[in-house]
Amino acid sequence: MKELPQYTEDQRDCLQEIVNVAMGQAGDSLARLLEVFVTLSVPKIQTLSPSEVRVALRSFVDSEYVSAIRQSFHDSKGQDGLRGEALVVYGDSSFKELAELLAYDDEELSEGLEQELLLDISNVLNGACLNGIAEQLGEELVYSPPSILGQHVPVEKLFQQDQMRWEMALSVEINYSLEQRSFNCDLLLLMPDTAIDYLANKLDEILEDD
Amino acid sequence: MPQISPELLKHSVESLDIGVFILNKDMEVQLWNQFMSTNSGLPSTAVVGKNLLELFPELPQRWFKKKIEGVFILKNRSFTAWKQRPYLFQFNHNRPVTGGVENMYQNCTFIPLKDSAGEVELVCITIQDVTDEGISQKMLEGTMHRLEESSRTDGLTQLLNRSYWELCLARECKRSVRYKSKTSLVMFDLDHFKAINDNYGHLAGDEVLREVSEAIRLTIRDTDIAGRYGGEEFGVVATDTDLVGVKLLAERLRKSIEELDVHYEDQSIPVTVSLGVAEYDESFSSHESLIKLADEALYYSKEHGRNRWASYPLDE
Amino acid sequence: MAIPLLICDDSNMARKQVKKSLPDGWDVDITYATNGVEGMDAIRNGQAEMMFLDLTMPEMDGYEVLDHVKAEGLKSVIIVISADIQPEARERVMAAGALDFIKKPINKEKLVGVLQKYGLL
């Protein structure tokens, strides 16, 4: 795992600050939706090879079994622009609380309902965070509906390494936890090589502006 | 650039083959397209300006409010998918004959409509009929399920095949150690099966195997697990059963097979089995030890007259 | 005389953005700090009659800085500029003695607005 070798110190700092601000906006969205205080930590930005993604997941998910949701995003420029996949990984903590907070508790918390709950929260986190980043970059993003990567499975089972068709991806890791509750999740934004280059140019534009 | 008039645009939305409707912050319907009218039976004139939740009290009210509120607060799209929530509105689908499902499956998207100042005063909801996708998915799941079953069963006898049956046995043995319960085993073998094949032909032999298997199925209890262990050898795992119980089961099996009246091309074929039973003990290294002991009892039966059972330890 | 002003943020870009957002022609003497520990040193050295403070920083965060300033009875007008924009974050820093709270990303309009609100210009 490398600390963005292809970026200059200024670019790294700029990206970190943009992500910090976006994370804060996403945390605020989550807080307003759930009416609780969300504890934020400093987002970790690095580049990962496909084989390192699982190691990274292992390192930040403190749970043997996890549930994960994925969602694609892209801008209007398609292949060459800002695009990637957002993963939200949840440890197997209590979903009951979360169900309560999102008014899902009228019904029995079935597997289907739990899935919907995860999809909903993931969509909120991804949307808020990515919109925050895009806005600061002067972009607008489009999202696919979120889908389930795995539910109560070991981290290793989440995806096969050979499914990843990129050499190096930019990973932005953000942790959200709710104060005084057991809920905890990690947001991982993965952007392929082409998006890394595109982002570098964008960061330069911002830096020149200063 | 050709100009599209607002009328034409409205007409397009009206005639889309997905449901489109728009709500304001008070949940009042602002637009209700043709798809929604047709499927709900409520024309636009009966709906526009009215509160959606009052019009459709069967909607999950609290959840729906929170969902819409989320779109207003976060100014972000939100979704529902049929896999988790089969439908939002109870609409009929257009496959009453071939469907096999009760309601139209729906994927919904909640879209914040930003005004020129970037404020969101309206939410647009689209409803996509995905009944076909849902039905194919269900069929696929059914096929997968059958495939999985078929990889577990023996083609001729429709009992579990050896590898899957052994897996079940191993699981039961472990379970009995964990929960301090009893697991016992019956192993049995057709008597003089080679002679049946030689005298009546292999097809007759197959018929015997099929009928014996059917007799096994009818004799065992719901919690017993029967499998075809080899050519003419069978095994039944008796869960939560001690040696006394499994002896009774062995006798029932022996009797029901002896009473079979197997016919092949107008010939009646007498069939009997020899059986051996044993109970699992946690000192055993694995389930294989249990098979070995039941087998020993089975050979004892073979050597001592056939059409009978014996239990391990053999001196009983 | 120039006002001693401290900009305390771990991000170089964030510090530059604050500087860029300062009112034109404002007579200030700027000191920069990249974490709370450096920030505290500057305050104790009298380099922070006024201060723009980030919350999330390594070594010592903004909440701790506020606590130390209060505990040591130091005089500094502190305006928090934060990426954590939850209403509760605002309440917490206001209770800890901050003058006001500005949501990131910062711009001239927001910063000047706050300064005018308190008659600091």
Image: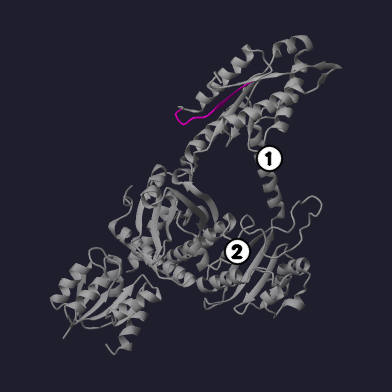
Residue A70 lies in magenta, yes or no?
no
The image quarter containing residue C109 is bottom left
Quadrant holding the C terminus of chain B: top right
Q: Residue at 66% across / 38% down in the picture? A: B222
Q: Which mark is residue A107?
A: 2
Residue A190: percent from the left, percent from the top? 44, 53
Identify the residue at the far front of this view. B316
Q: Which mark is residue B143?
A: 1
Q: Residue at 76% across / 58% down in the picture? A: B93
Chain of residue at mark 1: B
Left/right of residue B117 with respect to residue C29 in the rendered view: right
Q: Is residue B108 above or below residue B178?
A: below
Identify the residue at the far left of this view. C45
Query: In the rendered structure, which segment of residues is drawn in magenta?
Result: B275-283
Quadrant holding the N terminus of chain B: bottom right
Q: Is residue A144 visible?
A: no
**Which of label 1 and label 2 is nearer to you?**
2
Check disc 1 and report its element: helix, strand or loop: helix
Residue A106: percent from the left, percent from the top? 59, 67
Check disc 2 and report its element: helix, strand or loop: loop
